[in-house]
Image: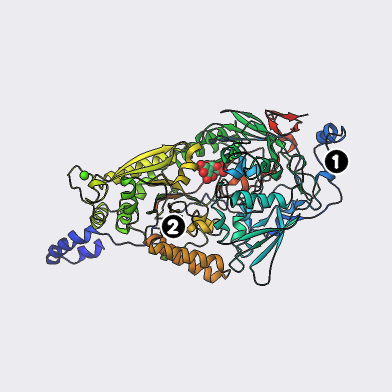
Amino acid sequence: MRKHLFALGGASLMLSVAMLGTMAQEVAPTTPPDPPKFDAQGFPTFVGAKDILEYKALPAYHEPAWVTKNFVDTGKLPPVAERLPKEPMVYLASNMPDGVGVYGDVMRHVIGGRPQGWNYAAGQVQGWGGIDIGMYECLTRTGPLFEIKADELEPLPNLAKSWDWSADGHELTMHLIEGAKWSDGVAFNADDVMFYWDDNINDPNVKPLNSNGPDSFGAGTTLTKVDDNTVKWTFKEAFPKQYLYTMAYGGFCPLPAHLLKPQHPKYSKNTYEQYQNAFPANYLNFPVMGAWTPVEYRPDDIVVLRRNPYYWKVDSEGNQLPYLDELEYKLSTWADRDVQAVAGTGDFSNLEQAESYVEALKKSADPAAPARLAFGARTIGYSIVPNLSGNGWGEPDARGQAVRELNRNLDFRKAITYAIDRQHLGEALVKGPFTAIYPGGLYAGTAYYDKASTVYYPYSVESAKAELEKAGLKDTDGDGVVNFPADQAGGANVEITLLANADYQTDKSLAEGVIASMQAIGIRVIINTVPGSAMTDTQNSGKWDWQVLRNGSELISVVQGTSSLAPTGPQTSPFHRAGTDKTVDLLPYEQEMVDVVNKFIATQEPAARVDLMKQYQKLYTENVNAIGLTQYPGALIINKRFANIPAGAPIFMFNWAEDNIIRERVFVPADKQSDFELHKDTLPGEPGLDKGPVS
Ligand code: BQZ
Ligand code: CA
């Protein structure tokens, strides 16, 4: 624009300055600049689901020698073949990067969260960082889909080993793994699945962790038991295959009904709070379907897990998985996770906080470094999400309600996005080709992203101020902060709270950058850092004006978490949920987004889906649904002694790397094994308070 202008010469200049005057006010929206080239990104070897696993009875099964000697031969455990289901899940050696593995050793995780207890079904947090992902297996699985060919993309079977659609596509019959057992030897069957659905997901007084409510499986969807190994879904839509993704991690990961049901208020005298807290972190040997279960917990210190002797997966030679006998989770900080992984005192990290990149890269560049660091695609993205509820979610006070009205005003949201200097924000985190300008919406470089459908409001303080005026905000008392309209919040200065997770430096750095940018246009933003342990409840409470949010997988993959792309149900959107009257007061463009997302769920036609996501991206970015800040690649740091780490595994896509790398088939070659195990040659004992491992 400017270039042409100068070409015009003298007289017109005067005119144009005037025009500039007004013109300068508003920089026209455009498409975003392309992300910087990033060559360090690794790529997976794409395969089909059938190349990874199958369900099959094998002629013989095996287990660690010490299990046979100390537990089977002594009659403490039945032989492995009797502990396995009729047809275990079999991981094919042909898809294992380093082939069939050997038993032994431990993976030492370091995490920033803290376990509240093991009742995932009632919304307790286990501390993140892979604890819950490893303990609670789900009906389907999507973490490993990063290496599945696009035209074969569908959730992998897991606890549900196969499923059939009825001819009209309204019924989905799911066949569960048959004859599998929880880690305490009790049978797993459809009753565990039905208890999770009826008395947790569908009990309005219970909200399982990571659950977006029953509507995330489709409004009016029902689930019934057919027999011990079969359940049947009935959907309003035809062939809504989308919901198979919701049945993966975090959406449908059943817990042991034989332990939880007796504690549930429907079947006991307990209150819902007593039910939620019935299995505190020192309740050990908690029955799981996962490969390891907690046998020791030291507050603020460590959680140690030992192999599940009833784990229902084997390799193609019949070796019962997992190969690793122990997992440890040191209770520290997320930043320390990177430090320890690079130093070799920890074994795993998702390098995700950009501030740590330069140091981690420098240290792991040394050939003698203990860990390997591998970058993936740009799938870490941050946004400022405005609370868009105008009808009472979080019961805002007068000031809070006035902020909601502003959040629901397009001119105001435009002002915010114009005021963000994303180039500077990214460079302030880390110099180099890592961060990209992210306007919001679907990420550049992902399957459904379309640049031409992406509206970007370039950084311009003048344009931001012009939009604030359009939103009716003036600094009526001349103290540098614009004021609410006279009839709202008493015409006071506009003050906005910004929720940020105190456990992440990146979240706080971005919050500080946003506060400075808002100050420049006369908006006072006050940071509200909340410790991770309280973050999930605060997010769900709606008691916040704006939030610094590390976006979920829905903006990367679209197919994982699709119902969270818009407020398709009362609890599905992270920043617009039902108000006091249980309805979501959708803005007109939001209604269009909901319609587009519901159409996407109801069609399998690839071309239609691509077009629908172009519409979605245009609606999202043109209406500044949320304010994108930055987008950058993460890197997986793993100690070099571990084998069977799949190439190109992203730290985050359909799920986090703790799921993506299939930890149950990760092993350490015999000659590289360490002596870091804390409870060598032990198995989980009886479930209970202050119980422990047994030998
Ligand atoms: C990865 C992840 C595994 C949750 C959590 C944490 C919670 C959020 C998010 C990530 C941590 C790690 O992320 O940062 O690298 O290990 O655990 O679950 O941020 O506060 O609520 O969504 O996954
Ligand atoms: Ca003022």
Q: Residues within 10 Å of mark 2 (few under 14, many from 20)?
A: many
* Residue at 87%, 34% in the rendered image: 75
The answer to whether residue 153 shows anywhere in this view is yes
Q: Mark 2 is on which residue type?
A: Val
Residue reaching furthest front? 269
> How far from the left and from the top, in percent, is residue 147?
62, 55
Q: Quarter of the image holding residue 285?
A: top right
Q: Which residue is mark 2?
A: 584
Say what secondary structure mark 1 lies in. loop
Q: Is mark 2 within 8 Å of ligand 1?
A: no
Q: Quadrant of the N terminus?
A: bottom left
Q: Mark 1 is on which residue type?
A: Pro
Q: Which residue is mark 1?
A: 79
* Residue at 59%, 46% in the rendered image: 657
Which label number is shown at residue 422? none
> How far from the left and from the top, in percent, is residue 265?
62, 42
With 488 as the anchor, is 640 left or right in this view?
right
* Residue at 48%, 61% in the rendered image: 449
Q: Nearer the viewer, residue 505 or 16?
A: 505
> How far from the left and from the top, in percent, is residue 282?
64, 30
Q: Quadrant of the C terminus?
A: top right
